[in-house]
Image: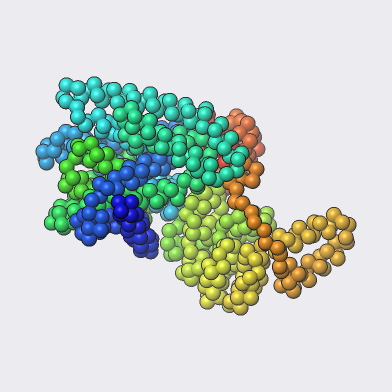
């Protein structure tokens, strides 16, 4: 019966999480808010569907472990080295100033103990790495001045969180006389563990994962990752440190390996589910009656948190050399509490260092600040412009249809590529060789960020939106190419294009020809089924090898197209396994790297960097508005350049580390 009860509780959590996350995504709000709301509603204070949250404590522990593991994966020693002035200058100043400010208020004004004040100050002083990086990427501001400042501060906050994770267990059960000794012992343990696990990650893990990848088994690869994470958590718990610390160090350890990207892709389903369960258990700690009674205090405290952090970070950023608009935007971006705050509060509760009512109040403050964050990041430029109208900010990419229209106002007779995946990028490369104007639209913010960093004329937007298409200059375009791989989306784009222009040609790429007639009827000029065209290309090569005259081959292929590929219909189905990688190696990819003032590559010739040893090549260098294709070995890189590397994922990471740190 007890196992059935656990099953029912997990079903309630999952059902509520699915509904809340779907609703919040419609409003483009972070899903973490949905999990917290679900926890609030099903917990012991509202509907009491789960009257005793302590029964699910093990789920909270697993969620906390994977939260810290995912944050550790994003940690980059190479990026920290390149941004070391921002990380150790601005980052350390921010953590110290904010923590000291909040500690003083909590301890002297509200009379909390030194231990409780320190924990809460740490929770409020740290920001949300996940939400900030996601929103900056979404609005293409990751490579802006305030974006780099924010990332540098977040990197130091990650290090500070490690210290907090070590200190909190030491705060529990120590007397005043033994406090310094306990803290020192914990720090020594943490440093020794950190060094040992990074050494294991550098020398042992790559060999182990390389051998496992040769088996081409997804199950074995995922199980190994889970084993590494849980083993690291178990080791730290066994020596008296928190399991979360072990998970974070494991994430850092694997994040420095060549298998980082594969690990991120494979572990994401487990991570997201367990993170959801963790945030639901955090939401169960919220007492709505107490929060409603103190709602005005929660809102005032949230506003105070946002304003105080914005002011402190802005002042520090300006004092350390940032212009006033960029400094203010950095403060706005980092004004919230974050995931580490939840982790620290949960750990403090587990060690009986914090009163549940106070913890619930602080959680509510962080939740409100996180809810406001997407809007602060989206409009940080406009807010900056309001305060500094004489110093307009520079956008890296347009964010609205009006700004997109302004940015593309001089384009005419251009080609609009809807979807910038593999096919869209291939088309663009060939069109560029003929100097044809190209404008690409894509709704994947990461892809837009990567491609824009590599010098592509690409903008974030929904290609099926009439407003976006109109802003992209559809009325002046000579051709629309639809390369998205979903039929429903392709059909919506064709309908939207035809509602604006009845004459512009539309070429649509599809996986096969199952919906060819529907797309034709909707207004597509040409429909190119990718799989069938690939078959025709293969047929062309085979027949050419058999010395059949080319004119005859061309006539047969053209006839097959005119007959709507009837000759190619029908084939025998066969079973096949989905493998991590057919050859056990990563695929070729492109990746942009921004050269900052502190990068090793700044001011050096390309041949001095010895990138050939990393088995990558530089495709182009973007310098302001110019793109230099295939620069020679004597080309000198400068701060502000963005170079596009081509190679395998692990080779690119080696080259990136060399560019950053030498």
What residue sits 23% from the left and 51% below the top? 52
- What kind of colouring is applied to the model shown? rainbow
Percent position of residue 167, x then y: 27, 31
Horizontal side, residue 249 vs residue 566: left or right: left
Name above or below for residue 521 compared with residue 189: below
Q: In this rendered view, identify the residue nearer to me: 258 or 46.
A: 46
In the displayed structure, 71 sits above or below 300; it is above
Where residue 603 sits: x, y (%)? Answer: 53, 32
- Nearest the viewer among 119 and 386 is 119
Tell me if residue 88 can be seen.
no
Instruction: Residue at the far front: name it.
Output: 1
Depth check: give the residue in front, 517 or 287: 287
Determine if residue 538 is in view. yes
Residue 72: x and y, percent?
Answer: 41, 38
Q: Residue drawn at (36%, 41%), measured in percent from left and top? A: 65
Residue at 19% in and 34% down: 115
Q: Residue at x 30, y 53 (%)?
A: 1
């Amino acid at each position: 019966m007890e196992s059935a009860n656990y099953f029912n509780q997990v079903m309630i959590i999952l059902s509520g999480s699915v509904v809340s996350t779907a609703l919040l995504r419609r409003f483009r709000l972070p899903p973490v808010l949905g999990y917290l709301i679900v926890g609030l509603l099903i917990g012991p204070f509202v509907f009491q569907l789960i009257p005793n949250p302590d029964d699910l404590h093990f789920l909270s522990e697993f969620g906390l472990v994977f939260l810290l593991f995912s944050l550790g994966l994003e940690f980059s020693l190479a990026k920290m080295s390149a941004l070391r002035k921002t990380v150790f200058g601005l980052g350390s100043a921010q953590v110290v100033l904010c923590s000291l400010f909040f500690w003083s208020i909590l301890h002297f004004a509200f009379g909390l103990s030194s231990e409780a004040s320190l924990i809460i100050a740490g929770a409020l002083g740290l920001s949300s790495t996940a939400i900030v990086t996601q929103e900056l990427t979404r609005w293409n501001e990751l490579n802006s001045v305030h974006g780099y400042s924010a990332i540098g501060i977040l990197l130091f906050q990650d290090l500070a969180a490690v210290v907090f994770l070590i200190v909190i267990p030491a705060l529990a059960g120590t007397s005043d006389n033994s406090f310094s000794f306990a803290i020192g012992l914990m720090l020594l343990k943490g440093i020794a563990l950190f060094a040992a696990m990074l050494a294991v990650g550098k020398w042992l893990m790559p060999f182990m994962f390389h051998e496992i990848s040769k088996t081409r088994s997804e199950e074995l690869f995922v199980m190994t990752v889970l084993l590494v994470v849980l083993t690291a958590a178990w080791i730290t718990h066994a020596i008296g440190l928190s399991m979360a610390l072990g998970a974070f160090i494991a994430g850092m350890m694997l994040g420095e390996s060549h298998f980082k990207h594969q690990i991120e892709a494979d572990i994401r389903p487990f991570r997201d589910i367990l993170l959801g369960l963790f945030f639901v258990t955090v939401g169960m700690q919220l007492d709505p009656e107490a929060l409603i009674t103190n709602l005005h205090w929660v809102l005032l405290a949230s506003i105070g948190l946002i304003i105080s952090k914005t002011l402190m970070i802005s002042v520090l950023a300006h004092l350390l050399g940032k212009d006033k608009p960029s400094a203010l935007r950095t403060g706005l971006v980092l004004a919230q509490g974050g995931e580490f705050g939840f982790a620290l509060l949960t750990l403090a509760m587990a060690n009986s260092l914090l009163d549940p009512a106070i913890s619930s109040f602080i959680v509510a403050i962080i939740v409100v600040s996180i809810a406001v964050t997407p809007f602060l990041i989206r409009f940080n430029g406009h807010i900056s412009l309001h305060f500094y109208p004489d110093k307009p900010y520079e956008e890296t990419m347009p964010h609205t249809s009006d700004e997109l229209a302004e940015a593309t106002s001089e384009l005419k007779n251009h080609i609009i590529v809807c979807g910038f995946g593999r096919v869209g990028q291939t088309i663009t490369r060939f069109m560029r060789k003929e100097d044809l104007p190209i404008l690409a639209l894509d709704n994947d913010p990461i892809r837009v960020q990567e491609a824009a960093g590599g010098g592509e004329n690409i903008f974030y937007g929904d290609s099926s939106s009439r407003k976006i298409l109109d802003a992209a200059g559809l009325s002046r375009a000579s051709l629309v190419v639809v390369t998205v791989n979903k039929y429903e989306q392709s059909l919506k784009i064709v309908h939207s294009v035809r509602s604006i222009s009845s004459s512009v040609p539309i070429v649509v790429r599809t996986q096969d020809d199952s919906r060819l007639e529907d797309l034709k009827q909707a207004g597509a000029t040409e429909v190119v089924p990718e799989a069938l065209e690939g078959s025709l290309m293969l047929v062309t090569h085979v027949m050419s090898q058999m010395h059949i005259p080319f004119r005859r081959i061309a006539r047969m292929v053209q006839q097959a197209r005119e007959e709507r590929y009837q000759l190619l219909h029908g084939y025998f189905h066969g079973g096949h396994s989905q493998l991590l990688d057919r050859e056990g190696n990563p695929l070729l990819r492109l990746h942009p790297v921004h050269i900052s003032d502190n990068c090793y590559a700044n001011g050096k010739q390309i041949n001095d960097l010895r990138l050939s040893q990393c088995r990558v090549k530089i495709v182009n260098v973007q310098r302001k508005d110019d793109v230099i294709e295939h620069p020679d070995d004597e080309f000198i890189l400068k701060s502000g350049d963005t170079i596009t590397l081509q190679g395998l994922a692990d080779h690119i990471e080696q080259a990136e580390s060399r560019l950053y740190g030498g």
